[in-house]
Structures are given as structure tokens and as C-alpha cells.
Amino acid sequence: MRRIIFLLLFDVLISGAIAAWLYFTRGVDAALMSGLSIFIALSPICLMLAEPFTLYLAKKQIAKLGVTFNKLDALKTLTEVNVLGLPYNRILTGGEFYITDLVPEGLNQPTLLAMAASAERDAENILGRIIYDTAASRALRLQPSTDFVELAGCGVEAKVSGTMMRVGNPIWLESLGVSMSAKLRTKIDQLLVKGKTVLIVATGRAARGVIALKDDINDDAKIFLAKLKANNIETLLLTAQPKKMTSWITKNFLLDNVRTNLTPEGKAREVQIFRAKGKIVAVIGNDIQDLPALTAADVSLLLEGGSLKSSDETKFDFELPTLESFLAVKEIAFKVVKTLKINRLLAASSWILLVPPALLSALETPPITWHPLASAAGVAIFSVIILTNSIRTR
């Protein structure tokens, strides 16, 4: 918009100055004819038509895919994306977690599940809700809890019947000095290499057992990753899962880079590292833990169906109904950028062809007769060509 305003002011200044000079040297008729010819020929009308109509058609086509398009500048950046960041849970997996293993230490399985569910009573993360709902469905007796705290990417802690209880990933609990037996560590490793999500249940500084959950592989995600590879888009997996799950993940998914043991801030840091290498990074996410990575990316894409929602404070560049729609939108973006380049070239051509004869008409003995209608006709012809070219984006 600023560029258009500048060009319009420049047009008024040039045509006005020449019209004023002609008025004092050759009279009103010469000033009116030449000034108007120059004003029309130099006007940014063609440039104004070069973008809005194209973007309007693109937005309509993107909307047909069920995609919400929030930021115009992101469309151009999307064509340059060569790295796509993805979380693991509920993107590469189906999002339907279920408990597969209860491994207690010094107590029985129902007690272990009831302890964890008591701590997870107020949890908002999906794993905590699964644990709580499973215990409730089994009619287990849950204890009241207080001082509940949920730490994104780590776990939860709460006082259950006056005892501090924590449920979370092994790395977090180890950092707090929670001790685990050799038997429990071996079991954790066995569960991780099978692609299961492991949570430790601890009271004080002692691990009381392990709860393992599984989320089935998203077959559509596997197809999507193969298409990314075919389109020369590098993949970057950003996950809080332990490093020992890496071999299982890489065995089942076609990925270029895998980063594990990441907090939400750690995910953002990995995105910034790739950007510092000169990469153009897009991130797809749908969980609150993905927000820092989405914010750090060149292009942010919110996948529907997760806990993260777009708001007035947090507007993502695109909101996608499926993973597949990413490539469809990227293809549209390529068409739009190509069309815009041609439109701008046509707008520049209109100045090259129309402005010189309009300026020459200001001479006392012009080499060519030029009428304001000729300028208007030329602008009209280029405008029609630009609008016709814009229709290519449909």
C-alpha cells in the first residue's frame, strides 16, 4: 500500500509540474492534454491490479481446500520453504492414546493407576486425561489432590493425601533426583524401543512404577512424508520423546532429522538453529507445546484437531484441515507467485510503452501525436491482460 501511495504521489508531482510549465508557456489546452496524458500513463493502476485480484482468487481456491489463510506475506515465503518441522504425537501418530502397560514396583497395578490418576485429576495434557479417564472407567478409588502444577513437556506434580507425587517423563524426574531401580530402567528401555510413551509415577524421590501408553501410527502421515521427500523438502521431527525412541521412529517414518528430549522452548531453539543455517522453515503443530516452535518458524501452520487454537492474540499463517493440504497450498502458492511476477512485469511494461510518448507530447513540436485517450486505452489494454493472467491461479 505504501508503494502505491508513493507512486501515486510521484505521478501527481511529475504530471502536475509538467502541466504547470505548459500552462505558463503554451496555454491551458497544452497543459491539459499533455498533463492528463502523462498522469494516466504514469498512474499505478496496472500495478494496483497486479496483486489484489490474484490474491483474491488464490484465497478462494485455498478456502476450497478447507484452509484458512491469515497472512498474505506468508504465501510467498511458503514457496521458499525447504524444511518442515513436525511434532510426533498426534501428527505422525493417530492421536488415540491407550494404556498398554502398568509396571508397578512394590504395589499392585490398580494402586499404581489410581495414584497416577489422583495426581492427573486436573491435567490438561492428553496423556494425563487418558490416565484419569482410564482409572475412572475402572471405578478406582482416587485420592484428593492439592497444589497441582502442570509443566509443559515434562509432567505434573501434586500433593496427594499430603504426599508430593509426580507423573512425567523419565528425563524430568531424573533431573529432580528421583531414584529408579535397575529393573525399572531396563523395563523403560524395552518399552521405548517398542515406540511406547513412558511416564514414571513417583512419590517424593522414589519411583513407584511405570505407565506406558501407545498411539498407533498415522498411515496418512507416512504417505505425506514420502511426498515431502519427492518435493525435496527436508523434514525435522521435534519431540519430547526420549532419545531411545529414535530407532523406532526412524524405522517407521521417512525423516531427515530427528530431535528428541525437547521441551517446548527446545523445539523453538532447533527451529532457530535451522533458520540460522539459511533454511526457510515451516512448522506444523496442533498442541500447546508446539506454540514456541510455531512462533519461531518462517511459516506457521496450525493443524486442526489439537488442543492449540488460533486466537486474536495468536494468528497462525495457515490453518490446515489435513497434512496433505500443506502440499496443495504450497502448489497454489507457486502459481500465485509466478502470476504476480508476470503481472508486475506487465505493469512495468505499461510504463515503458506509454510514458515516453506521453512525455514527448509535452514538446513544442512532438515527434508523435499523443492524446489522453491513447494513454487511457493503453492502460485499459494492459489492465485486461493483467486480470486475464490472474485468472490462471484458479
Image (cartoon, rainbow, N blue to C red):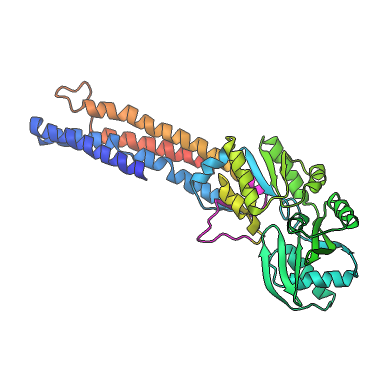
On the image, which quarter does residue 3 sit in?
top left
232 lies left or right of 79 = right
Instruction: Please indicate, yes or no, whether residue 328 appears anywhere in the rendered image.
Output: no
207 lies left or right of 358 = right
In the rendered image, the quadrant that contains the N terminus is top left
On the image, which quarter does residue 26 sit in?
top left
**Residue 262 picture location, percent across and down:** 69, 50
Is residue 61 placed above or below 335 in the rendered structure?
Answer: below
Is residue 166 placed above or below 238 in the rendered structure?
Answer: below
Front position in the image: 137 or 76:
137
On the image, which quarter does residue 348 sit in?
top left
**Residue 335 picture location, percent across and down:** 55, 38
In the rendered image, the quadrant that contains the C terminus is top right
Look at the image and give the residue range highlighted in magenta.
Answer: 308-328
Q: What residue sits 19% from the left and 35% below the top?
A: 35
33 lies left or right of 227 = left
**Residue 49 picture location, percent across and down:** 40, 42
Front position in the image: 16 or 61:
16
Can residue 319 be found in the magenta stretch? yes
118 lies left or right of 7 = right
Can residue 205 be found in the magenta stretch? no
**Residue 286 picture location, percent across and down:** 65, 56
Instruction: Please indicate, yes or no, whether residue 26 appears anywhere in the rendered image.
Output: yes
Is residue 91 placed above or below 363 in the rendered structure?
Answer: below
Front position in the image: 310 or 276:
276
**How many dots with numbers?**
0
Q: What residue sits 67% from the left and 36% below the top?
A: 231
* Magenta span dominant secondary structure: loop
Front position in the image: 206 or 44:
206
